[in-house]
Image: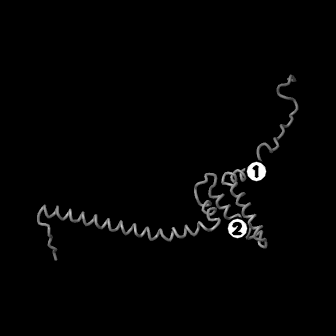
Amino acid sequence: MRKESKIKSLDDLRLEIAHLKTLARAQEDYLNDQYQLFNEKIAAPVRFVKSLASWVPGVDLAKGLFTKGNKDEDWLSKALRIGLPVILNRFFLRKAGFIKRALVTLLSQQAAGALNKDTVTNLIGKVADFVRPSAKRRKKPKHPDYGIPPDSETY
């Protein structure tokens, strides 16, 4: 069951190594070409969807919510920009008309843009300071009067 090797000398070994290197290079080129073709086939529907999305109004607003370009916005303000209009329209403006809902959506998105993690943290800190008794608001106990002060000339 032993397989006979076609390598009998050092020259045969070098020839086989060169043959295997060219074979590996050819296979890598083939796989690279197949990968490029696959990427082009995948990119075609993506390009089609992007061209359709460019025709829909408001897509730029939705893209702007999820890009990391704006340094003032963090995860909280992005979540509020999406969630606040949904909550307001779902629970508080059920029977409102389209124009009223659109105005509330625009205003709530502007208000959510002003909120970020730092402002909410500062607001919570101020509320906590108001609720907790502080050292300034505590009444200092008065020192009891024991009668004659210790530095008096009565002794």
Q: Position of residue 28 (x, y in %)?
A: 32, 65
Of residue 117 and residue 155, the one placed in the foreground of this image is 117
60 with respect to 146 (left or right):
left
17 with respect to 61 (left or right):
left
Looking at the rendered structure, the secondary structure element under dot 1 is loop
What separation in Å lies between label 1 and label 2 (alpha carbons)? 34 Å
Q: Position of residue 80 (x, y in %)?
A: 68, 61
Q: Quadrant of the C terminus?
A: top right
Residue 145 position by quadrant: top right
The image's mark for residue 56 is none
Question: What residue is shown at x 79% (from left), y 73% (from top)?
Answer: 95
Say few, some or many: other residues with alpha carbon within 10 Å of mark 1 (under 14 / 14 to 19 / 20 or more): few
What kind of residue is marked 1?
A: Arg
Q: Position of residue 33 (x, y in %)?
A: 36, 67
Check whether the beta carbons of the residues at disc 1 and disc 2 lie within 8 A of each other: no
Residue identifier under label 1: 132
Q: Quadrant of the N terminus?
A: bottom left
Q: Position of residue 9 (x, y in %)?
A: 11, 63
Question: What residue is shown at x 75% (from left), y 52% (from top)?
Answer: 127
- Closer to the eye: label 1 or 2: 2
Eyeballing the image, is 134 above or below 25? above
Question: What residue is shown at x 83% (from left), y 37% (from top)?
Answer: 143
Outermost residue toward the left?
Answer: 9
Residue identifier under label 2: 86
Among numbered discs 1 and 2, the one appearing first in the sequence: 2
